[in-house]
């Protein structure tokens, strides 16, 4: 699925199943909530935090994928609501980073 197809599918889902978009402010808050859920799993999977039960550890990787998908869904909602073409935005952002950072990381001994 392309990014544009994802934007179209989310828009269709919102307008048929979800009835309508939440406000941009509400979706921004929901986005932050989803970031927190991804962060919680990352702290347990890759950091020092422990899972509350062994069962949680067993499903954590699947949970992480699902939480990342939730995060992407809400980001796409916000892009649709604000008229952002994520394909163009990502393309432009990568070009900006390439120009800005073309020599920056090559000389960083911490990345070798």
Image (cartoon, rainbow, N blue to C red):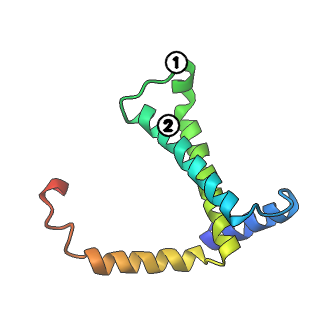
In this view, which residue lies farthest toward the top?
Answer: 54
Residue at the image position 64 percent from the left and 52 percent from the top: 30
Lateral position of residue 50 relative to residue 30, left or right: left
Rendering coords of residue 33 (x, y %): 59, 47
Element type at mark 2: helix
Tell me the crowding category of disc 2: few under 14, some 14 to 19, or many 20 or more residues within 10 angstroms, Cα based: many
Element type at mark 1: helix
In the picture, residue 106 is in which quadrant? Answer: bottom left
The residue that mark 1 highlights is 54
Distance CA(mark 2)–CA(mark 1): 14 Å
Q: Nearer the viewer, residue 23 or 88?
A: 23
Residue 6 in view in this figure = no
Residue at the image position 45 percent from the left and 39 percent from the top: 42
In the picture, residue 46 is in which quadrant? Answer: top left
Lateral position of residue 77 relative to residue 60, left or right: right
Q: Nearer the viewer, residue 86 or 36?
A: 36
Residue 27 in view in this figure = yes
Tell me the crowding category of disc 1: few under 14, some 14 to 19, or many 20 or more residues within 10 angstroms, Cα based: few
Rendering coords of residue 78 (x, y %): 65, 66
Image quarter where the C terminus lies is bottom left
In the picture, residue 43 is in which quadrant? Answer: top left
Viewer-side label of 2, 1: 2
Task: State the mark number for residue 41.
Answer: 2
Closer to the chain start, of discs 2 and 1, is 2
Rendering coords of residue 3 (x, y %): 60, 69
Lateral position of residue 112 relative to residue 100, left or right: left
Image quarter where the N terminus lies is bottom right
Whether 15 is drawn above or below 46: the answer is below
Residue at the image position 87 percent from the left and 62 percent from the top: 16
Residue at the image position 49 percent from the left and 24 percent from the top: 51
Task: State the mark number for residue 97.
Answer: none
Rendering coords of residue 45 (x, y %): 43, 33
């Amino acid at each position: 699925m392309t990014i544009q197809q994802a934007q179209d599918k989310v828009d269709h889902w919102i307008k048929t199943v979800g009835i309508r978009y939440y406000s941009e402010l509400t979706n921004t808050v929901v986005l932050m909530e989803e970031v927190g859920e991804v962060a919680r799993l990352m702290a347990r999977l890759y950091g020092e935090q422990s899972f509350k039960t062994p069962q949680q550890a067993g499903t954590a990787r699947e949970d992480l994928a699902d939480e990342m998908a939730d995060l992407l869904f809400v980001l796409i909602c916000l892009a649709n609501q604000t008229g952002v073409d994520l394909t163009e935005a990502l393309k432009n952002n990568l070009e900006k980073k390439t120009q800005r950072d073309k020599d920056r990381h090559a000389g960083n001994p911490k990345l070798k």
